[in-house]
Amino acid sequence: MLITAAALTGCSSSSSTSATNNPFGDAITTQQYASLRLGQDEQTIVDRLQMSGKPENLVADRVVKLFPRHDPGAVSCSYWQIAGDSALIVRLCFSSPAGKLVQKLERHA
């Protein structure tokens, strides 16, 4: 799973905020989020953003419950904070094993 691999290697970017301010580690801008299109390859997205978000298994249950349930065998999801809006959380889900973006959702925490 690319998201997990990238998370373990510590990918970061200038749009990231410190872990003390952002429980997700990585933050993306609203422009970056808006530019993501369903069907894009996971690796393309990770390469463009130069970060991976936080894998769902490492996200607090209270945050995961903000989003609709999904089949963990069919998709892998990562969570992000929107830079400049600590209450806005986004989830990106990629098909398994194809690695295509199949869902992008946002919620206020």
Image (spheres, rainbow, N blue to C red):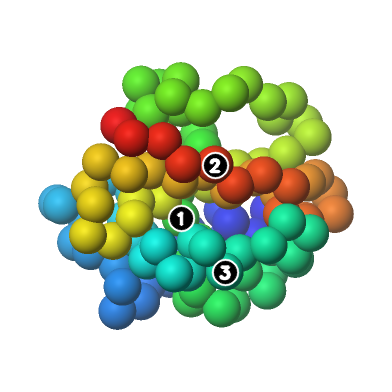
Q: Label 1 is placed on what type of residue?
A: Gly
Is disc 3 placed on a helix, strand or loop?
helix
**Tally of numbered tags:** 3
In the displayed structure, does residue 45 sit left or right of residue 83?
A: right
In the displayed structure, does residue 9 sit left or right of residue 24?
A: right
88 above or below 42? above
Q: Are marks 1 and 3 in contact (CB under 8 Å)?
A: no
Q: Are marks 3 and 2 in contact (CB under 8 Å)?
A: no
The quarter of the displayed image where residue 38 is located: bottom right
- Mark found first going from the N terminus, 3 or 2: 3
| Mark 2 nearby-residue class (10 Å; few <14, some 14–19, many ≥20) | few
| Mark 3 nearby-residue class (10 Å; few <14, some 14–19, many ≥20) | few
Name the residue beneath numbered marker 1.
Answer: 53
* Towards the viewer: 87 or 72: 87
Q: Quadrant of the C terminus?
A: top left
Quick check: can you spot residue 80?
yes
Q: Determine which of the numbered discs, if any, sits on residue 22 in the image.
A: none
Q: Report the Cα–Cα distance between label 2 and label 1.
A: 14 Å
Q: Are marks 2 and 1 in contact (CB under 8 Å)?
A: no
Q: Label 3 is placed on what type of residue?
A: Ser
Which residue appears at 50% of the width and 34% of the height? 57
Q: Position of residue 3 (x, y in %)?
A: 58, 56
Q: Position of residue 77 (x, y in %)?
A: 60, 42
* Towards the viewer: 18 or 101: 101
84 above or below 86? below
- Mark found first going from the N terminus, 1 or 3: 3
Q: Position of residue 54 (x, y in %)?
A: 44, 49
Name the residue beneath numbered marker 2.
Answer: 105
In the displayed structure, does residue 66 sit left or right of residue 4?
A: left
Name the residue beneath numbered marker 3.
Answer: 35
* Towards the viewer: 64 or 103: 103
- Mark found first going from the N terminus, 2 or 1: 1
